[in-house]
Image (cartoon, rainbow, N blue to C red):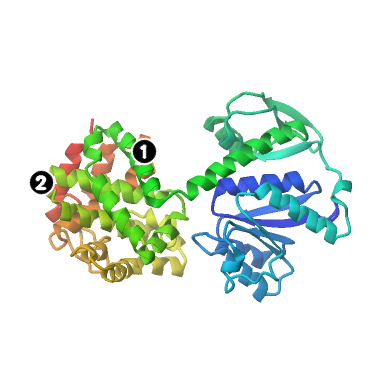
Amino acid sequence: MKTLDNKLEILIIDDESDILDIITFFIEDKFTQQVNIKTAPTGFDAIEMLKLKSYDLCICDHNMPNGLGSDVYKYIIDNHLPTKFVLCSSIVIADMPKQYSSDKIYYHIIKPEIESGVEKLFNMLSSENGQSSANLQPISNYVPVMVNLLFLLQELPCDIYLSLSENKFVKCLNTGESFSESDRNKYNEKGVHKLFVTRGVDEHKILNLINTSLFKIMANKNKPLGERIFEVHSKLTSMLKLYGISEELAGLAKDSIKNTVGEILKNEKEYRYWERLNLMGEYPSKLYTLQAILCGILTKKISWCSEPTLHKLVMASFFQDMTLDSIELMKIKDYSEFLEKSDKMTSKQKDNYMTHPNRSKEIISKIKDAPTDIDKILLEQHEMPNGEGFPRKMNATQIGPLSAMFITTGIMAKIILEEEEKLNPKEMFKMLERKGYNKGNFKEIFTSLRSLFTIE
């Protein structure tokens, strides 16, 4: 264990920001000597950080969207780095012998038992360095807590302190107060990312709440696919009410969504793709469910509401981004926006975006009993009415009505999720009109969608 004059350098990697904060808290609480902690949200980000700096410890999740824990582990082993690799995941190492060698992993913290895992890790390091953990005195009577973590806890079980200097702390929040989003924003805007609790009784009150929150996060992450989707459906239905869309209308696609989820669950390959997307957070579920809802409403509005037609559109909604590898790419509304942002992208990101319609088409064409024409819808998902989209450069009269509906609802779903309660429907439809999404085979779709939203 390094001394006070030589901080222990620790890199923590997890795609869940709340879990990153929780692990950071446990490390700073248990490692009573000084540590210098850096965090990364993906495996590939961590690898880039490892290229630039030497770390003593790397505490890493396994399942992450952009670079698995095993990619980080392999980089450390292949480059003979002195970094001790600690897996922090619910997976079983013995089940993954090709990815991990148990004799080269320093320790395995098994989620959600992070607190006890960090304590055992600390004891291992102390023993290895000939130090007794009992003799290592805390450098401060205050324990740091991330501001974002306090927001997760909401009601405060103890007084909270602000650090004015290394040795001076002042109380800023009282026991029982709520830590609101405005509180979080206020401190983050001021560059204050950590507040403090006193070591001892208050520290243990916080620990208990953090562990409770951790178990809730893990339980939510492990919810069955169908349960997650219908929770999202319920939230989106409530949001759409703000724009004058009734719960009955919003529920038109519910049965088709249920059937699509059922099909995904039956097919191991489809489910594996879907699970990978969901490791990126809630956005994919929200996007695809919202687009499916809009398709259900629209097919009813323009009398296309046959079950096979709706099923095609719903399945296309859930399969459109199966081969994309980032949320940033999923959020791009059309090809013109891609061109605006492409100068800040890597060649790998550009290739991933430009090839994904063809790759999605190939995947869906291999799925037994997939609806006819769904491969065409997926291939044409980024065409534009002015003929500048890709991959076929089709215009508003060449793009089929189903594809036109899918393209329009996809753009709208992304705008709605980006704006949420701040959405201005009038401005949204003005933008669509400027780009020609009211012409050719888009015209009836545009007019019907515009009539659905409350526009002042």
* SS category of the residue bearing label 2: loop
* Residue 427, horizontal then vertical, whole percent: 28, 40
Residue at image coords 23%, 69%: 392
Residue at image coords 54%, 30%: 180
> In the picture, residue 15 is in which quadrant?
bottom right
Determine which residue is flagged by label 1: 235
Query: For this rendering, which residue is in front, 164 or 278?
Result: 278
Residue type, numbered disc 2: Ser
Query: For this rendering, which residue is in front, 129 or 417?
Result: 129
- The reply to whether dot 2 and dot 1 touch (C-beta < 8 Å) is no
Residue at image coords 56%, 48%: 17
* SS category of the residue bearing label 1: helix
Left or right: 403 as drawn, with respect to 364: left
Residue at image coords 13%, 55%: 441
* Residue 35, horizontal then vertical, whole percent: 76, 51
Q: Quadrant of the N terminus?
A: bottom right
Left or right: 16 as drawn, with respect to 318: right
Question: Which of the two discs, 2 and 1, labels the residue nearer the N terminus?
Answer: 1
Instruction: State whether residue 292 is above or below residue 385.
Output: above
> In the picture, residue 62 is in which quadrant?
bottom right
Q: Quadrant of the C terminus?
A: top left
Instruction: State whether residue 264 is above or below residue 143.
Output: below
Left or right: 169 as drawn, with respect to 16: right
> In the picture, residue 316 is in which quadrant?
bottom left
Instruction: State whether residue 19 is above or below residue 394.
Output: above
Determine which residue is flagged by label 2: 303
Measure the alpha-carbon separation of dots 2 and 1.
Answer: 26 Å
* Residue 252, horizontal then vertical, whole percent: 21, 42
Residue type, numbered disc 1: Lys
Badge 2 density bin: few <14, some 14–19, many ≥20, Cα 10 Å: few
Query: For this rendering, which residue is in front, 104 or 246?
Result: 104
* Residue 304, horizontal then vertical, whole percent: 12, 49
